Amino acid sequence: MAKADFYETLGVARTADEKELKSAFRKLAMQCHPDKNPGDAAAEKKFKEINEAYETLKDPQKRAAYDRFGHAAFEQGGMGGGGFGGGGFAGAGGFSDIFEDIFGEMMGGGRGRRSSNGRERGADLRYNMEITLEEAFEGKTAQIRVPTAITCDACTGTGAKPGTKPTTCSTCHGSGRVRTAQGFFSVERTCPTCQGKGQTISDPCTKCHGHGRVTEERSLSVNIPAGIEDGTRIRLQGEGEAGLRGGPAGDLYIFLSVAPHPFFKRDGADLYCTVPVSMTTAALGGKFDVSTLDGTKSRVTIPEGTQAGKQFRLKAKGMPVLRSSQVGDLYIQIQIETPQKLTKRQRELLQEFEQISSKENNPESSGFFSRMKDFFDTLSD
């Protein structure tokens, strides 16, 4: 039976970004996990299917291969996985495309990029952009400059001098391929005269020297939505290199990274901030203000006897959820600072406090050593 489409398995559109893929996977995984469905073979099968779908689509390279060739991109012997017998490559559908792309490019063919009239799709480009956490919180429109190959305006991409035009190759008659007989076999290879273009240029354009493209730095506007996460990829369709001889342009991929913040750490839509407080404030209680990314300040009240590691939640003070009205939370974690460089009087007061302290003042430390002693006493019996 044919495999279900990976996007349908996860219940997402083919345009879904990494955040949407992860959210859909987590939701389905929780529903179908074998621990929640003991003895349910159907749930176990579904769990394996969504795992396979997510592992493929979360990887940019695997996803690109799947989008182009489907399940055949990862199967031995093409569709059906039955080796090279039977229908052979002709019946293999997408797998024959993969074979042609790999070996055809080595021989100058490249059916996946070049058409029969010599037009060739432009290359995809990558642009790495780093933004601050504040920019990820608010969203922004960024202006970037990208050096790329664009269509030559002098020859409109033909590569021929204005007023002239390319002529059909006399060797391959425009197909870009030639066949030669070797014994019982007939071998097809790239035309040596036109290098697979199907056309020859006798009088090349002086601006692009016959390439049909020139290199130029372009200014582009990139919309970065609020709540974007580190590692997100933004695709600008048709903004890559111009195609050869009138071929379609490639795409531009913006790979975003969020710079480390001096105060906040991010986990999804939630933010975490460690705040040091004095030993006396932790013991007696107190208040302090924390600045948040939305430009406001929030007051945190710590009760008497607060311990190190205690967290306080500030609701809806975290990051916005991408393409949603939801907002994460901000968690304040207390770090108790031990006094340093004590004066003589300060030392005397602390020693006096230690002498008059009871187990009720330090229940955790008193109980810990008592439990440790009992544990090792039991092992020695």
Image (cartoon, rainbow, N blue to C red):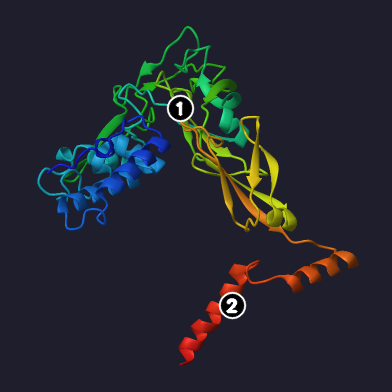
Observer-nearest of 360 and 377 = 360
How many marks the image carries: the answer is: 2
Instruction: For label 1, count other residues whose C-alpha is less than 10 Å away and answer few (under 14), some (14-19) or many (20+).
Output: few
Residue type at mark 2?
Phe
* Position in image of residue 4 (x %, y %): 20, 40
Please indicate, yes or no, whether residue 343 appears anywhere in the rendered image: no
* Residue lying at 77% horizontally and 68% vertically, measured from the top left: 353
Q: Is residue 8 above or below residue 280?
A: above
Left or right of residue 312: residue 2: left
Please indicate, yes or no, whether residue 121 appears anywhere in the rendered image: yes
Secondary element at tag 2:
helix
Disc 1 designates what residue?
Answer: 325
Tell which circle, 1 or 2, labels the residue nearer the N-terminal end.
1
Observer-nearest of 8 and 41 = 41
Q: Are marks 1 and 2 in contact (CB under 8 Å)?
A: no
Instruction: For label 2, count other residues whose C-alpha is less than 10 Å away and answer few (under 14), some (14-19) or many (20+).
Output: few
Q: Quadrant of the N terminus?
A: top left
* Position in image of residue 367 (x %, y %): 57, 73
* Residue lying at 61% horizontally and 74% vertically, measured from the top left: 366
Distance, label 1 to label 2, CA atoms, is 49 Å
In the image, farthest residue toward the bottom: 381
* Position in image of residue 115 (x %, y %): 32, 25
Q: Is residue 355 above or below residue 183?
A: below
Observer-nearest of 98 and 136 = 136
Residue type at mark 1?
Ser
* Position in image of residue 323 (x %, y %): 44, 27
Disc 2 designates what residue?
Answer: 369
